Image (cartoon, rainbow, N blue to C red):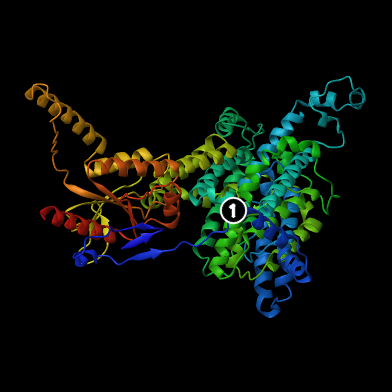
């Protein structure tokens, strides 16, 4: 006998049938009392939050500044060599990428170096991951660059030079009756590049505030909606947009950067319209750089287990290309576009433009989410690999401060980057000290070497950016394997990739999230719902459609619904149950009523209108079963519609003399059934710990009823 909250699994039998009654042991589960006092909960949380002791303050400070925990324990002899080697190598790789990705973000090269420098230092202080490299990330740079270009166009900086000269003339500035394109044009001391970094820094500040707020309110759960397949598809789709945005530099074309919906197609149309203006010098330089970079990168990957450090081919290419451009006078002779003057030192700090916040606040949301999702996922992945733990909440604080603080020093948005993290790990990184070494390498470039890159062609930077997209574009090779593992994930990848590439990156991310949610809903809307059979000599029941040689018990149908039962799939539950059992109780009841009416009319005719002695005996065709056992092991929860559906099913089947038993309900489902008054006194709705117990009960009850009928 099984009892769940005063619900009995077997009824008492007449005396003398003790043997038959003993086919079940009595079982009783007493639920724990749940304290639901909201007042007590709030008071307890307030006391916990507001209490201030020296030990608690110390714990808070040490958790907020992880560097105070691990730096005093730093093992100099064991860790220093690996940290210095990995820091120097990552720094050498990061210098050319920082310069190259600055173009992608619509900024001058110096701002990319600033960004990498400050991000490395701040993550050293706040970060908990020992291995991830925080700095410039291509997809984030692309999203920043799109917003920067839009705001520059709104401000009128992309107008014709003649128009700008009128708008920026001092007399026009003094005369307030002249209507400017935008008030920002009146800031005469801020040219186009200055305004670009102002927009980028303002959006970086807002993105950082969002990330810190997510950490404070512990809403990191948002990242669970960004599945691996969604993020991978998003990065691959954005890679096509990055490649497209850099194509004009490969050809030396001076065309406006397209933004908004369909920017990828619009850019390629502009490229082909202006392809006759290709700069042959830039085209040849790009081709030669590809010939050097791609094979060397492949060799680095192929022999990464044998090489102590990857070959810094990007730095070699940049140095060689700069020397060739300088001594060959490529800018003066062939009109090649070059990086231009890169100043040394640091600019004085300045706050973000608060007037720009309404313009970029919405754009900063997807940037903040993508940034912290990638950072948290990479930090957890490498922490698990190397056997230590990271705090996801602290990682959100860290990446948030990596954006908030640098935004005052002319920087744009950063996040963790997989490629540089892999290099950092493979070259012996042991702690966050490696990031400090990287920042020192970049500092050396900022203070001494930066002006030497004046003659560096922009097409070389574009080639470096495109070559670093190989990892994302190679995901197409994994599609057959992904399709074999999960077709749903593959479709999510394809939809997100296509939307990110052909519509826009922000809309692509939104489309991917919405499509993923729809896939989850559709999978619960039309779930698997097989009939189960008994595995001989065991207490196990499995799907009849999936396995052979399963047995069925006479008169008993076992049905499993593999999804939560709620308002979306309640009709699917009923229709599938009716289809699998082959009996729709509503139709059976209707047929009974029709047959009863026909018999009533026939008897009225036969008896000459005497209705008082009429008794209707309608014998229906046998259904083939007397019990349905519903296996609820995969039903995670019920809502009111689900409870009502179960009530209707039990009631309908009971009216045609078929009992319905529920087995393997989890505590949440049982609690919902009790709150929904599913069980009432005198009803035979029963709960069982296992399908085997339910089947045994049904067989015993049917045997007892058969014996009673024969007596």
Q: Residue 660 appears at what percent x and percent y?
A: 28, 49
Residue at 79% across / 25% down in the picture?
181
Instruction: Name the residue carrying label 1.
Output: 374
Residue at the image point whose x is 59% and y is 70% from the top:
388
Q: Residue furthest top?
A: 177
At which x and y percent is residue 99?
Answer: 70, 50
Which of 565/475 is in front? 565
Q: Quadrant of the C terminus?
A: bottom left
- Rendered image quadrant of residue 703: bottom left
Q: Work out which residue is located at the far left of the displayed protein and give it.
A: 606
Q: Secondary structure at mark 1?
A: helix
State the residue in front, 217 or 101: 217
Q: Is residue 135 visible?
A: no
Q: Is 425 located above or below residue 509 in the figure?
A: below
Please tell me how many numbered marks the rendered image carries.
1
Please give left or right for residue 161 compared with residue 35 in the image: right
Residue 357 visible: yes
């Amino acid at each position: 006998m099984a009892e769940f909250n005063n619900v009995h699994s077997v009824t008492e039998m007449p005396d003398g049938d003790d043997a038959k009654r003993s086919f079940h042991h009595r079982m009783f589960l007493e639920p724990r009392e749940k304290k639901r006092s909201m007042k007590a909960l709030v008071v307890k949380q307030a006391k916990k939050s507001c209490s201030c002791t020296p030990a608690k303050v110390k714990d808070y400070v040490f958790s907020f500044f992880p560097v105070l925990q691990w730096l005093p324990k730093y093992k100099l002899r064991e860790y220093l060599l690996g940290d210095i080697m990995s820091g120097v190598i990552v720094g050498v790789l990061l210098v050319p990428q920082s310069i190259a990705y600055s173009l992608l973000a619509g900024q001058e090269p110096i701002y990319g170096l600033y960004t990498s420098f400050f991000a490395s230092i701040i993550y050293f202080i706040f970060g908990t991951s020992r291995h991830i490299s925080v700095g410039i990330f291509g997809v984030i740079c692309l999203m920043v660059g799109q917003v920067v270009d839009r705001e520059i166009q709104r401000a009128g900086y992309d107008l014709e030079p003649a128009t700008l000269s009128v708008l920026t003339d001092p007399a026009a500035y003094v005369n307030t009756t002249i209507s400017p394109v935008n008030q920002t044009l009146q800031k005469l001391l801020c040219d186009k590049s200055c305004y670009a970094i102002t927009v980028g820094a303002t959006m970086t500040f807002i993105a950082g505030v969002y990330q810190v707020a997510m950490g404070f309110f512990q809403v990191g759960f948002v990242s669970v909606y960004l599945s691996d397949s969604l993020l991978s598809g998003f990065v691959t789709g954005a890679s096509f947009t990055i490649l497209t945005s850099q194509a004009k530099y490969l050809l030396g074309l001076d065309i406006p950067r397209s933004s908004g919906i369909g920017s990828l197609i619009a850019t390629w149309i502009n490229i082909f319209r202006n392809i006759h203006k290709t700069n042959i010098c830039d085209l040849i330089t790009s081709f030669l750089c590809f010939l050097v970079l791609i094979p060397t990168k492949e060799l680095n990957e192929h022999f990464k287990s044998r090489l102590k450090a990857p070959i810094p081919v990007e730095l070699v290419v940049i140095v060689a290309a700069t020397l060739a451009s300088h001594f060959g006078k490529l800018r003066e002779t062939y009109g090649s576009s070059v990086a231009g003057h890169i100043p040394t030192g640091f600019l004085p700090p300045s706050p973000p433009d608060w007037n720009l916040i309404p313009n970029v606040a919405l754009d900063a949301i997807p940037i903040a989410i993508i940034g912290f999702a990638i950072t948290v996922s990479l930090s957890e992945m490498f922490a698990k690999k190397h056997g230590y733990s990271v705090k996801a909440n602290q990682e959100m604080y860290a990446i948030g401060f990596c954006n908030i603080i640098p935004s005052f020093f002319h920087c744009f948005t950063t996040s963790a980057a997989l490629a540089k993290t892999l290099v950092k790990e493979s070259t012996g990184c042991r702690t966050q000290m490696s990031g400090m070494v990287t920042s020192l390498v970049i500092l050396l470039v900022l203070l001494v070497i930066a002006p030497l890159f004046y003659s560096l062609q922009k097409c070389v930077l574009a080639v470096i950016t495109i070559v670093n997209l190989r990892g994302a574009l190679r995901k197409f090779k994994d599609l057959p394997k992904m399709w074999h593992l999960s077709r749903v994930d593959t479709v999510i990848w394809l939809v997100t990739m296509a939307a990110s590439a052909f519509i826009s990156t922000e809309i692509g991310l939104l489309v991917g999230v919405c499509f993923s949610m729809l896939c989850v809903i559709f999978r619960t809307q039309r779930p698997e719902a097989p009939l189960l059979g008994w595995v001989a000599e065991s207490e196990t029941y499995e799907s009849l459609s999936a396995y052979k040689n399963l047995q069925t018990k006479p008169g008993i149908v076992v049905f499993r619904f593999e999804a939560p039962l709620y308002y979306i799939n309640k009709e699917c539950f009923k229709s599938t149950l009716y289809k699998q059992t082959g009996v729709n109780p509503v139709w059976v009841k209707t047929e009974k009523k029709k047959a009863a009416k026909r018999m009533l009319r026939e008897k009225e005719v036969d008896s000459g209108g005497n209705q008082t002695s009429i008794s209707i005996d309608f014998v229906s065709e046998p259904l083939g079963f007397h019990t349905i056992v519903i296996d609820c092991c995969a039903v995670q929860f019920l809502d009111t519609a689900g409870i009502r559906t179960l009530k209707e099913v039990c009631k309908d089947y009971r009216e045609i003399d078929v009992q319905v038993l529920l087995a393997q309900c989890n505590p949440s489902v049982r609690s919902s059934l009790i709150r929904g008054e599913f069980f009432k006194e005198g009803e035979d709705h029963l709960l069982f710990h296992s399908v085997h117990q339910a089947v045994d009960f049904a067989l015993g009850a049917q045997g007892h009823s058969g014996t009673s009928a024969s007596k």
